[in-house]
Image: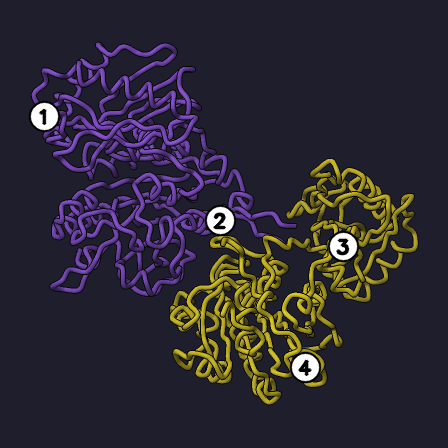
Chain colours: A yellow, B purple
Amino acid sequence: MSEVVLPEQQVERGVPGKPIVLVVMDGLGGLPHPDTGRTELETARTPNMDALAARGSLGMTVMVKEGITPGSGPGHLSLFGYDPTRYVIGRGALSALGVGIELEAGDVAARLNLATFDDQGRVSDRRAGRPSDADAARVVERVQKAVEAPEGVEVKFIPEKEHRVVLHLRGPGLGGAAISDTDPLETGRTALPVQALDAGSKATATVVAGILDQTRRILADEPRMNGFLARGFAAFERIPSMDERFGLKGLAIAKYPMYRGAARLVGMQIPGVPKSTEDTVTLLEKSWGKADLYFLHFKDTDTKGHDGDFAGKVSAIEEVDALIPRINALRPEVIIITGDHSTPAIYKEHSWHHVPALLASPWARPTGAEFGESACRAGDLGVIHATDLMPLALAHAGRLVKYGA
Amino acid sequence: MSEVVLPEQQVERGVPGKPIVLVVMDGLGGLPHPDTGRTELETARTPNMDALAARGSLGMTVMVKEGITPGSGPGHLSLFGYDPTRYVIGRGALSALGVGIELEAGDVAARLNLATFDDQGRVSDRRAGRPSDADAARVVERVQKAVEAPEGVEVKFIPEKEHRVVLHLRGPGLGGAAISDTDPLETGRTALPVQALDAGSKATATVVAGILDQTRRILADEPRMNGFLARGFAAFERIPSMDERFGLKGLAIAKYPMYRGAARLVGMQIPGVPKSTEDTVTLLEKSWGKADLYFLHFKDTDTKGHDGDFAGKVSAIEEVDALIPRINALRPEVIIITGDHSTPAIYKEHSWHHVPALLASPWARPTGAEFGESACRAGDLGVIHATDLMPLALAHAGRLVKYGA
């Protein structure tokens, strides 16, 4: 009595074929447009997704808990079947994994933003005017060459994208990584001090504070990119892979490093970096046959949501819809289409609202031929936790055995 | 790793404005009338609540667990965001808080009913003919004056309402309060013996048995109110306030003491006692600006449900509906309208059925312009635990931060 049944205890290993495709449109969930009462997804013309809905089961998902707005890391962990309240991964670690760093247990990582500081040390631009990747890389190289690593610590700065940089620390001179962010989140204020949030993180905090001081001196003559703001400090602990847990070899295709990082964290392979939305599917076609689970990440839906661009988010959804026939042509056993959280265009931020989900398979219970919040609300799956999607995909792909006799 | 994420860990403190109003119609949930197929709430004409539904998210709530019928205490704790299986508060403690007793840790309280006993000691009326408040107060005063407190124990009898009395015990002579009820729940039987349900509660049981014996002797010459039945013994343990957990200063307006008690337990202030249903909103208007969360309790829905008075419950709902425009006029950011449990008029008791819930805010996902069980069943929130309503209210009021990056 009173044992928890985990899906991984029911996994049948060595099942051939029957691939699963997980399509994530970042920030997919929306809120109704005031004029039409229809969300972004309900407004978009999505004939291909609607056809999948006609042979799929629909539902709404809770990513973390009711009322809790997920960051992208927790949202993706949930979709991969990992309870994000149990597997807590800092943004820094996700970014480090995303840029290809082979993190080891005990490593500390943080997300840095190149920023502009004025003469009084106040932040005048939190993103240093969004530099090009090349400009940022030049400045990061300057810092990497000049920085003096403290005793017993390796220090690496790796450019991520535009103003985004990863700080990666390794060595016996470190402790925990419970360290407060230095980003004041608004301009006109100085960076916040680096503070250890527990006793075990004091050594790391001292190391980080010293490094950030050095970077301000090294970059003092740069007009725009003259310092860093840091957030999302994390010490890395290895977590079990999807292969270990679910018998699934995963493969991730994502343009942005953080999502590749989330995928790498759970053991997915990364066949390359797509250059465009369309290229994501081209890379899928090239990689077909190499994995059991193919995770495709599309970012534009979230970006347009943050911009408050309702029509833009609609277009981003339609752009993904147009690629569905090429995914279908590969004949996956199961296709899931969903988001990692909601980013309603009228709200302009990540939100806590349920996320629509579609699971197409020969064993679905269809409820209609439309993919949208209203249809998903009335779908066969009901409102489920997003961590249940992966076990459902496994079940639909014949990869779970019966529980009990 | 492996921390449970509680909504309170995501609370942003010091958020100004954006007040939340929680309207509780006691026992709101109903069952269909056999002639019409419509519940009490679906039968009631509720144009104002329907208008809120049109800009709100609807759902159904589970108060404790599926199949479990909640008492008013657990029901309200759930609505306040407290898991009632974790925070177990006896009816006695709720009543004691409700009549304004400043309970201290270790105090024991119980709910007493004035009752009528016949010559053989059998209960002939479990509520002593529902005496007036004044009649009950006279008898309670007699008891208080004559009772001899055992060594090391303070004994207080406080009239609550009609036949309801609170017994409050304090002192080193007490132990635990795991004590069985003495109410036989039907007439024609003698009171049940006072029994300790664990070893640590034996001292308290002995004290209580002695006191109840004394009251029978003191009141022997009273024709109707000649003894007490006791239930809901509870030792009081302080629980964290809503301010501590959610950053919410609460204010409660409730005609009946027990609901003020539940509110006081979680740290709400009590601005006064409304004299009528309408006066509840008048007191809200006078108190506006003093809190973040305003809890309004309306009792008649439950009373009419217990009476089996379907039409009366419908009227009680309509009476509350008529007050909604005055609540709207205060411009709360979030309005929740729900119940603490179901009391279907055809069932005449509290029941385990899901309770309809409406959450109106600028960030809702409306699904129609009707507030009722059928509409809530098809609502955007799905079937959720009632403890999730408070985190949802916090999210809609912009009082929770993102979880993870």
Q: Between tags 1 and 3, which lies in front? A: 1
User: Which residue is found at the position 58% from the left and 62% from the top?
Assistant: A78
Q: Position of residue B375 (x, y in %)?
A: 29, 63
Q: Position of residue B137 (x, y in %)?
A: 17, 19
Mark-to-mark CA distance, 4 and 3: 33 Å
Mark 4 residue type: Leu
The foreground one among B158 and B378 is B158
Mark 2 residue type: Gly
| Whether label 2 touches label 4, CB < 8 Å | no
> Is residue B240 shown above or below A258?
above
What residue did someone put label 3 on? A114
In this rendering, position of residue A130 left or right of residue A357: right
- Element marked by disc 2: loop
Residue A318 is labelled as none
Q: Between tags 4 and 3, which lies in front? A: 4
- Within 10 Å of disc 3 (Cα), the crowding (few <14, some 14-19, many 20+) is many
What residue did someone put label 4 on? A284
What residue did someone put label 1 on? B118
| Whether label 1 touches label 3, CB < 8 Å | no
In this rendering, position of residue B18 left or right of residue B186: right
